[in-house]
Amino acid sequence: MLIVAACQSGGSGGGFFAPPQPKDPKQIAEEEGKILASELLAYCPNVTLRDGTAFFNSYAKGGQDDPAKLTYQSAITDATRNCTRTDTTMSINVGVAGKVVTGPAGGPGTVNMPIRIAVIRGEEVLYSQLHKNAVQVADTSMATQWVFTIPNITIPKPTARDVQIFVGYDEGPQKKKPQG
């Protein structure tokens, strides 16, 4: 009889047979490390490689465009992104992958490549930054693969699907030729 009485006693918080309190689906997902369908379907701008910016050639001093003076050639082979949102902002992480091949005038060492990441809405530039990606080339007989990430690019939260991310090599402004 004491066993039965123990099962039936209880405070106002419900007992053994009380229905479980419902949990918020977002809280459950966070506790279990799962991603909600709404997050999978949320807008994250596409990454586009601009025409003419997929390859970058470097030449020995005074050897511009001379194939015999090519020190290395680098190519962007893939780019991706992921996004997180708050009520007012979107944070974007961009990843760029590629490879470096040593040319006839090249050798082992560090290769510095200028990579520009730009986030655009129509004609408005939300973010544009030139980054230096340093890659260590050890074996000149084969391609050296690299991955470069740019975390936490923060922009105002888009109200439409009108934002685009561009990546590519960018040597910066063209030097002016002396007039004479």
Image (cartoon, helix red, strand yellow):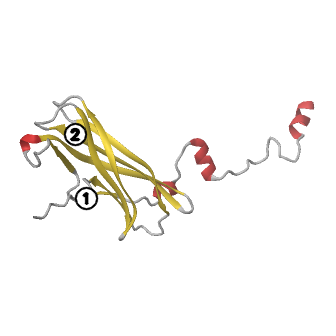
Q: In this view, does 100 lie to the left or right of 39?
A: left
Q: In which quarter of the image is residue 16?
A: top right
Query: Could you tell me which secondary element the residue under label 2 belongs to?
Result: strand
Percent position (x, y) of residue 36? Answer: 53, 52
Percent position (x, y) of residue 106? Answer: 15, 35
Q: In front here: 58 or 179?
A: 179
Figure quadrant of the C terminus: bottom left
Q: In front here: 29 or 8?
A: 29
State whether residue 146 is above or below residue 95. above
Q: In this view, does 142 lie to the left or right of 97?
A: left
Q: In this view, does 168 lie to the left or right of 126?
A: left
Q: Quadrant of residue 2?
A: top right
Q: Which amino acid does label 1 sit on?
A: Pro
Q: Name the residue under label 1.
A: 173
Q: What residue type is labelled 2?
A: Val
Q: Count residues near mark 2 (Cα–Cα under 10 Å), then give few for <14, some for 14-19, many for 20+.
A: many
Q: Which residue is drawn at 58% across and 42% down?
A: 32
Which dot, 1 or 2, sits closer to the camera?
1
Mark nearer the N terminus (1 vs 2):
2
Q: Return the mark for residue 100.
A: 2
Q: In front here: 149 or 26?
A: 149
Q: Residue at x 89, y 35 (%)?
A: 6
Q: Count residues near mark 1 (Cα–Cα under 10 Å), then give few for <14, some for 14-19, many for 20+.
A: few
What is the C-alpha distance between the residues marked 1 and 2? 23 Å
State whether residue 51 is above or below residue 77. below
Q: Residue at x 21, y 30 (%)?
A: 108
